[in-house]
């Protein structure tokens, strides 16, 4: 068995770096949080090549004494904790004392710092965590940390880094979150020499939201304020009509610390119940303030997950504050169903027997027209004059519906008897009962091949019997589900949106026809979070291939000039937001994954929606695809049909 030995400080720092420093954004997070804790009022973040080759964070905080610079880069060295009791009431963003040591161990690092009122500052250089002597330096008050060649000595971590654009987007999203949580601090982000973000730092939250998340998002917000004893919540939520396709614009803070919390997400979305369209999500910027001993922030290395002492109280606070804000904005929750029962009698019409007979007499007295046989003529042929073609189907007075077999399917003999034309000299009437099949004329001529002179009388067209359909549509319920019965006495419920979505997806994926594009009269701007914006910008060529004409508009905005003809123009921004969310969630950059995400979005937006009134012919096509086995699941994996056997139905009614 190998001997037990203590790890060297360098190896221990590399292990700690693996937990603390995941990517360049992790470095920015730790350095900016230190700047905030130092009391800075202005913080600047500069980066090149996504932060992999150059990253600099400058602040005007309290600074570090020259003799304390080497100590700051030792593991577990911190100025924010002194006793074990301090862990129960952490009021700073950073506190573990591991960040600087971990960052320095995987990079070339320089730090310049000068305390307020000091005549000069000091600088320290570290290579892979090994410090050189401290030297005096002329620098402004505050601290500036420069990180170069991140992960230069850990190639295993370096190969897992994403493209520079994606890493820069992650940093932009992080800086935006930090700016939103501290509106009294002015943040600047400079990417590759260009200023990407600049918040005013005047203490006004809405101005910070405007600078960090865009004009359109800021204009769609409603202010939220709530208090329950020592607990408080403040911030903004979006109006119900400004719902988005993803949760990418939901931002939560606890005591000004950015967190990811399913509890807070559920509380906000519960406030939008019966106010927001299905499939849409609210956006928000909310900060929950509570005593430090009521929240534990030391449960995750990245400190983005917290635990609350009283979760129900936090949920109720956020829910009621958001709900009250929406009510004040003029979007009250719907009345309870009990209040709507009074209108139920209006659904039926009652009349006397005399009124009913009078109504029947009026209908009978209406003149009726006998529809003359119509012949469809191809315009392209008729314009040339001379011979014209008769369409395959000649409209006649429809025969009475044929009798059905016990299974619900039409018997072939009855189909033929109902639709075969009469022989010459006989009246055109359907046969009352199945009869031996008549032999067709010796030389049948199909309608598609029949040609007549303009002066000649049209010849009678022979109609082939309709193909036997092994199912029938019973109806549609809730304008969403098709009810169908098959020949084996099974009842099917078919989700028409899911079925149509799968048909669209398969058609797009097989490239059965070119994607037609439609120009928008007025270009549409879609505002996206930083991560989704970066994911979408990297796929502009793929978007053009499928009918989207998009271009960068700056500050997280995408300009849409054209979109596929299948998509409604009013869904342009929503489609792009949904696609960006899918691309950001896949965590894969391969072309096939991005292509599938785009096709999913196009198929969903172009499909029949639940709640729409549908034509019987549309329903027939959908049922045919499902019953033939061509469509079984929607692109998201949900089933499109549910089957109930006769035995299952009889068992429900206690007949089996």
Image (tube, rainbow, N blue to C red):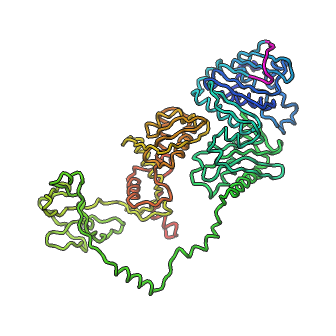
Q: Estimate the x, y position of residue 270 in percent, counting from the top left.
A: 67, 54
Residue at the spot 50% in from the left edge and 57% down from the top edge: 610
Residue interval drawn in magenta: 133-144
Q: Estimate the x, y position of residue 82 in percent, counting from the top left.
A: 87, 31
Residue furthest to the bottom in view is 354
Residue at the spot 56% in from the left edge and 76% down from the top edge: 345
Residue furthest to the left in view is 442
Choose top left, top right, bottom left or bottom right for residue 586: top right
Q: In the rendered image, is residue 5 in sight?
A: no
How many marks are shown on the rendered structure?
A: 0
Answer above or below: position of 491 versus 185.
below
Image position of 612 (left or right of 288):
left
Answer above or below: position of 49 versus 613.
above
Q: Estimate the x, y position of residue 32 in percent, counting from the top left.
A: 74, 30
Quadrant that contains the N terminus = top right
187, 160: nearer the viewer: 187
Q: Estimate the x, y position of residue 540 in percent, counting from the top left.
A: 49, 34
Choose top left, top right, bottom left or bottom right for residue 424: bottom left
Q: Would residue 509 be counted in the magenta stretch?
A: no
Q: In the rendered image, is residue 120 in sight?
A: yes
Residue at the spot 86% in from the left edge and 34% down from the top edge: 84
Residue at the spot 65% in from the left edge and 47% down from the top edge: 219
472, 93: nearer the viewer: 93
Answer above or below: position of 163 versus 635.
above
Image position of 83 (left or right of 315):
right
Answer above or below: position of 271 versus 403.
above
Image position of 229 (left or right of 649):
right
195, 104: nearer the viewer: 195
Q: Would residue 135 be counted in the magenta stretch?
A: yes
């Amino acid at each position: 068995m190998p001997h037990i030995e203590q790890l060297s400080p360098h190896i221990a720092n590399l292990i700690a770096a693996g937990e603390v420093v995941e990517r360049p954004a992790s470095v920015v997070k730790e350095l900016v949080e230190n700047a905030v804790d130092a009391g800075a009022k202005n913080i600047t973040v500069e980066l090149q090549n996504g932060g992999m080759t150059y990253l600099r964070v400058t602040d005007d905080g309290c600074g570090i004494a020259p003799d304390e610079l080497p100590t700051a880069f030792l593991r577990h060295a911190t100025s924010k904790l002194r006793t074990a009791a301090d862990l129960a009431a952490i009021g700073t963003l950073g506190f573990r004392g591991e960040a600087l040591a971990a960052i320095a161990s995987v990079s070339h690092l320089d730090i310049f710092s000068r305390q307020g009122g000091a005549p000069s500052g000091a600088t320290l250089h570290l290579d892979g965590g090994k410090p050189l002597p401290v030297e005096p330096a002329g620098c402004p008050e505050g601290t500036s940390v420069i990180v170069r060649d991140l992960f230069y000595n850990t190639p295993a971590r370096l190969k897992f880094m994403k493209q520079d654009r994606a890493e820069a987007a992650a940093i932009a999203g992080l800086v935006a979150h930090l700016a939103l949580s501290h509106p009294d601090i002015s943040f600047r982000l400079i990417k590759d020499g260009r200023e990407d973000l600049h918040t005013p730092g005047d203490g006004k939250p809405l101005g910070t939201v405007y600078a960090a998340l865009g004009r359109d998002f800021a204009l769609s917000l409603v202010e939220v304020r709530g208090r329950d004893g020592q607990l408080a919540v403040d911030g903004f939520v979006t109006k119900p009509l400004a719902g988005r396709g993803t949760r990418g614009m939901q931002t939560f803070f606890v005591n000004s610390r950015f967190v990811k919390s399913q509890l807070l997400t559920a509380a906000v979305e519960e406030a939008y119940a019966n106010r927001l369209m299905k499939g849409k999500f609210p956006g928000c910027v909310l900060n929950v303030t509570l005593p430090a001993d009521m929240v534990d922030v030391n449960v995750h290395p990245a400190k983005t997950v917290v635990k609350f002492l009283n979760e129900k109280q936090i949920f109720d606070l956020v829910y009621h504050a958001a709900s009250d804000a929406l009510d004040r904005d003029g979007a009250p929750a719907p009345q309870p169903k009990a209040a709507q029962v009074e209108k139920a009698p209006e659904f039926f019409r009652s009349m006397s027997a005399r009124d009913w007979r009078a109504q029947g007499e009026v209908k009978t007295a209406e003149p009726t027209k006998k529809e003359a046989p119509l012949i469809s003529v191809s315009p392209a042929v008729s314009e040339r004059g001379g011979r014209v073609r008769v369409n395959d189907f000649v409209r006649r007075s429809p025969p009475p519906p044929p009798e059905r077999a016990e299974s619900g399917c039409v018997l072939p003999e009855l189909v033929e008897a109902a639709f075969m034309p009469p022989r010459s000299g006989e009246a055109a009437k359907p046969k009352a009962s199945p009869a031996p099949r008549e032999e067709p004329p010796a030389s049948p001529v199909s309608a598609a091949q029949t040609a007549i002179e303009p002066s000649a009388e049209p010849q009678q067209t022979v109609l082939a019997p309709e193909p036997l359909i092994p199912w029938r549509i019973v109806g549609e319920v809730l304008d969403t589900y098709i009810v169908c019965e098959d020949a084996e006495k099974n009842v099917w419920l078919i989700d028409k949106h899911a079925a149509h979505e799968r048909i669209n997806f398969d058609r797009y994926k097989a490239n059965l026809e070119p994607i037609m594009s439609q120009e928008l009269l007025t270009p549409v701007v879609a505002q996206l979070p930083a991560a989704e914006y970066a994911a979408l910008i990297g796929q502009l060529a793929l978007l053009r291939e499928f009918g989207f004409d998009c271009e960068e508009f700056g500050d997280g905005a995408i300009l849409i000039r054209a979109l596929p003809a299948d998509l409604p123009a009013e869904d342009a921004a929503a489609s792009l937001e949904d696609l960006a969310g899918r691309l950001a969630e896949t965590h894969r950059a391969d072309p096939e994954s991005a292509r599938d995400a785009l096709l999913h979005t196009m198929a969903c937006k172009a499909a029949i929606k639940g709640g729409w009134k549908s034509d019987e012919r549309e329903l027939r096509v959908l049922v045919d695809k499902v019953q033939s086995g061509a469509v079984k699941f929607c692109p998201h994996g949900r089933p499109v049909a549910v089957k109930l056997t006769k035995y299952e139905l009889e068992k429900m009614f206690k007949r089996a």
